Amino acid sequence: MDFNFSDDQQQLRDAVAKWVEKGYGFERRRSIEAAGGFSREAWDELAELGLGGLYIPEDDGGLGMGPVEGMVVMEELGRGIVLEPLAQSLIAGAVLAGHADEDTRDNWLPRIAGGQALVVLAYQERKARYRLDICEAEATKDGDTYRLSGTKSLVPAGDGADAFIVPAQLDGKIALFLVPRSEDGVAARGYGTQDGSRAAEVVFDQAAATLVAPDGLPALEHAVDIGIAATCAEGVGAMDKTLALTVEYMNTRKQFGTAIANFQALRHRVADMKMQLELARSMSYYAALKLNAPAAERRQAMARAKYQLGVSMRFVGQNSVQLHGGIGVTDEYIGSHYFRKLTQLEMVFGDSLHHLGEVSSRMQESAGVFA
């Protein structure tokens, strides 16, 4: 199998890497974090690169690209620990393009692709514990529209989003809805998160909603799987930069008159970090390549990838801090921000223990010596 990137994919990577290097330096990131964790100006710059429409068909104003291009972009954003939630636009574009009616597509997809509308997935509830089939939000038919009530937690950039994709119970099963934030009955309380980005608790109280998918659970699973693949790629980019920072520090930090990079025991730990990074990279490729597979195969692949990424991110982040010493956790040093990002990414779209359980449950038919 050829794992080389095409010229177009490499050009896309170079364009995003250039923006991260030139336009999203550490000081700008810190200023965005201090201002709340989300910058509409930076979001517009991402839109100018066409990234909001990465998964949106060309007929709807997007680029019509696929999972590998998404992986390439998210890796570079991970290297810059970019706070703006581009993965949410990938999710929204794919879900609306694949499930929404023509009017909804025409109304929202060009605006998502152009960056005029930030649409985010609002699916987590306090009792769900990462399970997608547990949903207490409810929707009812009200003439030609629907009314949705419920509370969703940890909604990315929820108090700055223009609309939400929301799962809710409808006639005894989960359906997927689109709810503009401007609707009466929508209230968002924003807060900063551990990695410096922004999230919100969003309360819907009989808010007007547009039905996107009556059979919403398969659509929700696909949306989350897109998020998992994006998170895996973002984690690889963040780990890549974390390792580079650690090696650079070890080559400059001296102890007993010599750079600590010369100590064999520490070199072995860096080698272990590199091994974990490459394991994660291969599983991120695996996730991207399986994103358009049949649902059962795709779900199993995403659980495997996210589990390995969780293990790798924890290992690389913690070892980086230990090899740096005290400076590794100071706010002034960029390495601490990578550690925070990796720590939070492990929890996004299901933590390592959750996905270990998912992997195990999907292996029951083949488990055991006599299977």
Image (tube, grey):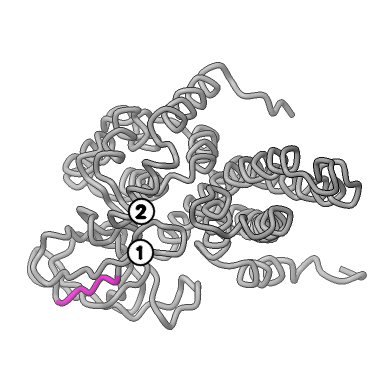
Location of residue 179 by image quarter: bottom left
Density class for disc 2 (Cα within 10 Å; few <14, some 14-19, many ≥20) is some
The residue that disc 1 covers is 192
Of residues 103 and 338, the one nearer the viewer is 338
Magenta stretch holds residue 6: no
Residue 323, image x and y in percent? 73, 54
* Left-right relation of 368 to 40: right
Magenta stretch holds residue 203: yes
Q: Which residues are magenta?
A: 201-205
Q: Which amino acid does the dot numbered 2 rest on?
A: Glu
Residue 39, image x and y in percent? 28, 46
Of residues 85 and 301, the one nearer the viewer is 85
The residue that disc 2 covers is 33
Callout 1 touching callout 2 (CB < 8 Å) = yes
Q: Is 168 drawn above or below residue 254 in the view shown?
A: below
Q: Residue at x 35, y 64 (%)?
A: 192
Q: Is 173 drawn above or below residue 330 in the view shown?
A: below
Marked residue nearer the N-terminal end (1 or 2)? 2
Residue 303, image x and y in percent? 63, 60
Q: Is 5 drawn above or below residue 102 in the view shown?
A: above
Please name which of the two marks, 1 or 2, marks the residue nearer to the observer. 2
Q: Residue at x 71, y 70 (%)?
A: 360
